[in-house]
Image (cartoon, rainbow, N blue to C red):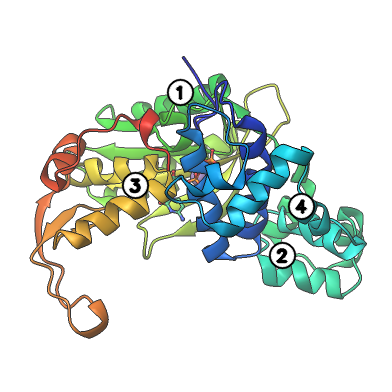
Amino acid sequence: EKHDGNGLNNNPNARTIDILQKMAVYYERTADNWRTTAYRKAIAALRKQKSKICTKAEALAIPGIGQRLADKIEEIVSTDHLRRLDNINATPEDRALQLFLGVYGAGFAQASKWVAKGYRSLEDLENKAELTANQKIGVERYNDFKQRIPRAEVALHGNIIRAAVHALDPDMEAMVAGSYRRGAADCGDIDILITKSNGTIEYLRTLMIDNVVPKLMEKGFLKASLATTSRGDGPKWHGASALPGTDLWRRIDLLFVPGPEIGAALIYFTGNDIFNRSLRLLARKKGMRLNQHGLYKDVLRGPNQVKLTDGTLLEGQDEKRIFEILGVPWRPPEHRIC
Ligand code: DCP
Ligand code: MG
Ligand code: MN
């Protein structure tokens, strides 16, 4: 049975969750991490409830829901509405800010600048603003990128990438991760892991960036390259793709992973992000460290928990084994929603 990737099937609190979700999205966009986390924790807790939570007292009895959230839950249930959500869209400036925050690559700072310059619409941005190449794409394809991608279509994009990758190297693998792997009925973007059991990151990257990506651009499947990063999270390519015969652009992310790291990378790229955070925190509490490359022990930390050494690799390849070593019961991707 497929769900929305966020565990919302016939949930008695679906309406409440829907409104809290909108608040969470708002806070996420305004980079209010503290509130975003509080809302998402409350949403996760509500999802687990078997009955409808109607009063503040009922809400407060649930771990992970505090006073303010409990007030809001009661307001939503009793009025079928949340006034705070209306306020977010109260003025033309607010509405413009919300609109601009949806432009790919535009953060809060950029969106605020556009508002301050007096821009109020996408047309304003197109006609008056000085846009970077990526921002131009973000504006032109605003309505495309905003749309959810049906699960079946995500699979088709995955198949095209996989076929292209196999044509060059039959030992290279392409796996669809992200919300798709969590079983979502529709996804915000397409997340694909590219790996080879004995392939280095450099090998994978070169093959993809110098061969597969240009070829798929030429074929017209890939539409634009939006970002390539190689630091921090590891080599990643962000771009856009569209199925043959359509002009609906989708956001697609490719992550390159050497074989020995595939288990840790699968955990990372399957998410969700909150689940990842809690798993990493748990590892830390047990004196280990989990990142997208592997699970490590004997990580020396100095004052303020600053990491002094990388530690010894315990496991990177086997996803299940990482759960085992952490002492966490195996959680299939569909249940990795926090
Ligand atoms: N990820 C993470 N921390 C972040 C961003 C992402 O751990 N700050 C990981 C977990 C995500 C995965 O990367 O599940 C893919 O990121 P997406 O932003 O594509 O998120 P999802 O695929 O989970 O959801 P969506 O359907 O919105 O794309
Ligand atoms: Mg995704
Ligand atoms: Mn993504």
Give 296 or 9, whichever is nearer the viewer. 9
Question: What residue would you read off at disc 1?
Answer: 159
Q: Which label's residue is closer to the chain start, 4 or 2? A: 4
Q: Nearer the viewer, mark 1 or mark 3?
A: 3
Question: What residue would you read off at disc 3?
Answer: 268
Which residue: 79% across, 58% down? 88
Q: Which label's residue is closer to the chain start, 1 or 4? A: 4
Task: Judge the density around disc 3: few (<14), some (14-19), many (≥20) Cα neighbours within 10 Å.
Answer: many
The image's mark for residue 132 is 2
Q: Which label's residue is closer to the chain start, 2 or 1? A: 2
Question: What residue would you read off at disc 4?
Answer: 85
Residue type at the position of mark 2:
Thr
Q: Quick one: SS at disc 2? A: loop
Q: Which label's residue is closer to the chain start, 3 or 2? A: 2
Task: Judge the density around disc 1: few (<14), some (14-19), many (≥20) Cα neighbours within 10 Å.
Answer: some
Tell me if I can see residue 210 in this picture: no
Question: Is the CB of mark 3 within 8 Å of ligand 1?
Answer: yes
Residue type at the position of mark 3:
Tyr
What separation in Å lies between label 2 and label 1 (alpha carbons)? 31 Å
Q: Quadrant of residue 285?
A: bottom left
Residue type at the position of mark 1:
Asn
97 relative to 205 in the view: left or right: right
- Residue 61 location, x and y as percent? 47, 46
